[in-house]
Image: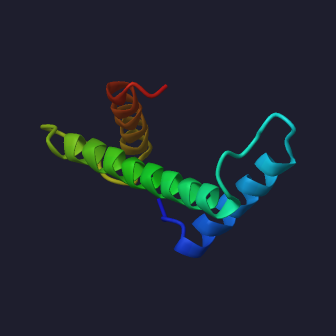
């Protein structure tokens, strides 16, 4: 997975902030800059955790006696399954 640039994360955060500010169901308790920084932080943290989940899944594949070759459909399916298990281990569905 290619990690998005800092600029792209900030752009996504601004778009999310704009969408939230257009909603009548959302009221900001802090100023827009503080909310924007909180969104950027949340996105960055989740992307970091996503990388950690993928790394943990790849380590688990590497510990198998006969791991499938990288890039094969079997490897990709196993990687996806193990990443899902990492999500479940964290309590994220």
Q: Is residue 10 above or below residue 83?
A: below
At 67% across and 58% down in the image, what residue appears?
31
The answer to which quarter of the image holds residue 78 is top left
- The answer to which image quadrant residue 61 occupies is top left
Residue 28 in the image: x percent, y percent? 71, 46
**Vertical arrangement, residue 89 with respect to residue 20, above or below:** above
Residue at image location 72% in from the left, 55% down from the top? 17
- In the rendered view, does 65 fall on the left or right side of 74? left
Indicate left or right for 41 with 22 as reference.
Answer: left
Residue nearest the observer in this picture, 31 or 8: 31
Between residue 28 and residue 16, name the one nearer to us: 28
Q: Nearer the viewer, residue 2 or 66?
A: 2
Q: How many labels were placed on the picture?
A: 0
Residue 68 visible in rendering: no
Judge whether residue 27 can be spotted in this image.
Answer: yes
Residue 47 in percent (x, y) is at: 46, 54
Residue displayed at 79% across by 56% down? 18
Q: Position of residue 52 (x, y in %)?
A: 32, 50
Q: Is residue 93 above or below residue 34?
A: above
x%, y% of residue 39?
58, 54
Coloring scheme used: rainbow
């Amino acid at each position: 997975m290619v990690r998005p640039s800092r600029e792209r994360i900030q752009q996504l955060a601004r778009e999310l902030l704009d969408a939230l500010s257009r909603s009548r169901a959302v009221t900001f308790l802090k100023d827009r800059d503080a909310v924007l920084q909180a969104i950027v932080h949340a996105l960055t943290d989740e992307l970091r955790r996503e990388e950690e989940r993928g790394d943990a899944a790849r380590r688990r594949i590497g510990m198998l006696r006969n791991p499938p070759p990288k890039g094969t459909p079997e490897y990709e399916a196993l990687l996806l399954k193990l990443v899902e298990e990492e999500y479940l281990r964290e309590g994220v569905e």
